[in-house]
């Protein structure tokens, strides 16, 4: 039973994925996801370049341990 609880609590929790960032940035930048280049800037920060634009995103997290949920948030001025 504990194994099922551990698996259930791990699903959808934790760090936000690069694919989630690519999807969000494509929407916000109005640029196809396959044209975006991601650059790790450290400290949960990623740069996104594409379609003549450059944005910076950070992971914003709530919770602790297995209950931690993160999402990507734009951390630069949008053009």
Image (spheres, helix red, strand yellow):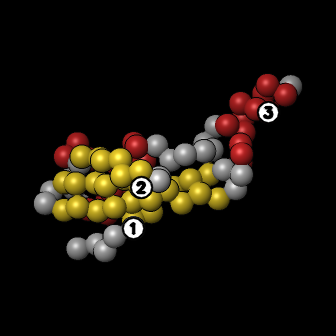
Circle 3 SS class: helix
Q: Position of residue 37 (x, y in %)?
A: 24, 46
Residue 41, above or below 3: below
Q: What x and y, as percent, mark residue 60?
A: 54, 60
Indicate the quadrant containing the C terminus: top left, top right, bottom left or bottom right: bottom left
Q: Is residue 72 shown to the viewer in this render?
A: no
Asked where in the image residue 63 lies, by quadrant, the reply is bottom right
Does label 1 or label 3 sit earlier along the sequence?
3
For residue 54, side relative to residue 77 (left or right): left
Whether the residues at callouts 2 and 1 have beta carbons within 8 Å, the answer is: yes
Mark 2, secondary structure of its residue: strand
Q: Residue at x 28, y 54 (%)?
A: 48
Disc 3 crowd, CA 10 A, few/some/many (<14, 14-19, 20+): few
**Residue with the mark numbered 1:** 75
Q: Which residue is mark 2?
A: 45
Where's residue 8, x and y in %?
Answer: 72, 35
Where is mark 3, residue-wise? 5
Who comes first in sequence, dot 2 or dot 3? 3
**CA separation, marks 2 and 1?**
9 Å
**20, above or below 58, in the image:** above
| Residue in the picture at 65% in, 59% down | 62
């Amino acid at each position: 039973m504990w194994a099922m609880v551990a698996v259930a609590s791990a699903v959808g929790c934790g760090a936000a994925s690069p694919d989630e960032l690519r999807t969000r940035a494509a929407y916000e930048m109005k640029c196809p996801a396959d044209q975006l280049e991601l650059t790790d800037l450290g400290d949960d920060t990623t740069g996104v370049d594409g379609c003549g634009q450059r944005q910076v995103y950070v992971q914003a997290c709530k919770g602790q341990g297995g209950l931690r949920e993160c999402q990507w948030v734009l951390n630069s001025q949008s053009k």
